């Protein structure tokens, strides 16, 4: 029985290594978008990825035909949401040290936008994952998209000289 368990363990390890080789890059990019870090300086994203892969490995034998990528992505999103909620309460605006393109979005907006547009997850699935109504997910996605497409204008200095009254 020891050889059989060793063979199963080796097979499991090979399957998981193949999964990681194919999925880790995309999952890291997703995590980097969520954390609004830059790709070359993304410690929070790397931590999220490590936790998601560890969770996926722990569940590997129980997947029973489920998509391991979907499981890892769900865990990554849930962990990000929970961390943002617990650290800052109710999804505040972006963190001051975030420097990525999505940094101007609130964490919840980033989460919805990344899942919907980058990952292609249906509104209904995002709503179920976050415990929100589908209409709310749609509104959050629309607002986040508008914020990125039409950023607020920066105040400009007054142009021209004062005109003296005559």
Image (tube, helix red, strand yellow):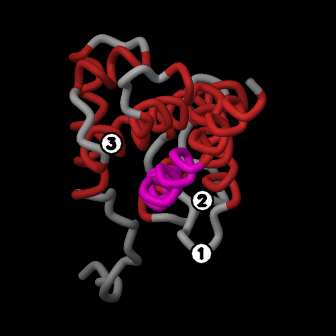
Whole-percent x and y of residue 42? 63, 63
Hey, which quadrant is residue 38 in on the image?
bottom right
- Which quadrant does the C terminus fall into? bottom left
- Left or right of 144? Residue 85 is right
Q: Give the mark nearest the N terminus, 2 or 3.
A: 2
Crowding around mark 2 (Cα neighbors within 10 Å: few <14, some 14 to 19, many 20+) is some
Identify residue for label 1: 40
Identify residue for label 3: 113
Magenta stretch: residue 31 in it?
yes
Identify residue for label 2: 98
Crowding around mark 3 (Cα neighbors within 10 Å: few <14, some 14 to 19, many 20+) is many
- How far apart are the alpha carbons under marks 1 and 2? 13 Å
Residue at x-position 60% and y-position 59%? 98
Whole-percent x and y of residue 57? 62, 36
Q: Secondary structure at mark 1?
A: loop
Whether 25 is drawn above or below 107: the answer is below
Q: Secondary structure at mark 3?
A: helix
**Which portion, as a residue range, is magenta?**
14-32
- Left or right of 119? Residue 1 is right
- How far apart are the alpha carbons under marks 2 and 3? 17 Å
- Left or right of 74? Residue 124 is left
Residue 103 visible to the viewer: no
Residue at x-position 21% and y-position 17%? 135
Whether 10 is drawn above or below 58: the answer is below
- Left or right of 81? Residue 25 is left
Residue sitting at the far bottom: 161
Q: Main secondary structure of the magenta part?
A: helix
Residue at x-position 32% and y-position 83%? 159
Hey, which quadrant is residue 112 in on the image?
top left
Between residue 68 and residue 129, name the one nearer to us. Answer: 68
């Amino acid at each position: 029985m020891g050889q059989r368990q060793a063979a199963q363990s080796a097979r499991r390890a090979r399957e998981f290594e193949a999964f990681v080789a194919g999925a880790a890059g995309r999952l890291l990019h997703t995590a980097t978008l969520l954390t609004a870090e830059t790709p070359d300086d993304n410690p929070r994203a790397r931590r999220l990825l490590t936790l998601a892969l560890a969770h996926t490995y722990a569940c590997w034998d129980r997947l029973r035909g489920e998509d391991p990528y979907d499981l890892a992505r769900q865990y990554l999103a849930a962990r990000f949401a929970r961390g943002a909620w617990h650290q800052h309460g109710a999804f505040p605006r972006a963190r001051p040290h975030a420097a990525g393109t999505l940094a101007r979005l609130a964490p919840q907006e980033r989460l919805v936008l990344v899942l919907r547009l980058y990952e292609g997850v249906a509104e209904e699935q995002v709503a179920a994952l976050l415990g929100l109504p589908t209409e709310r997910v749609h509104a959050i996605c629309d607002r986040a998209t508008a914020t990125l497409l039409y950023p607020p204008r920066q105040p400009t200095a007054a142009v021209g000289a004062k005109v003296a009254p005559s």
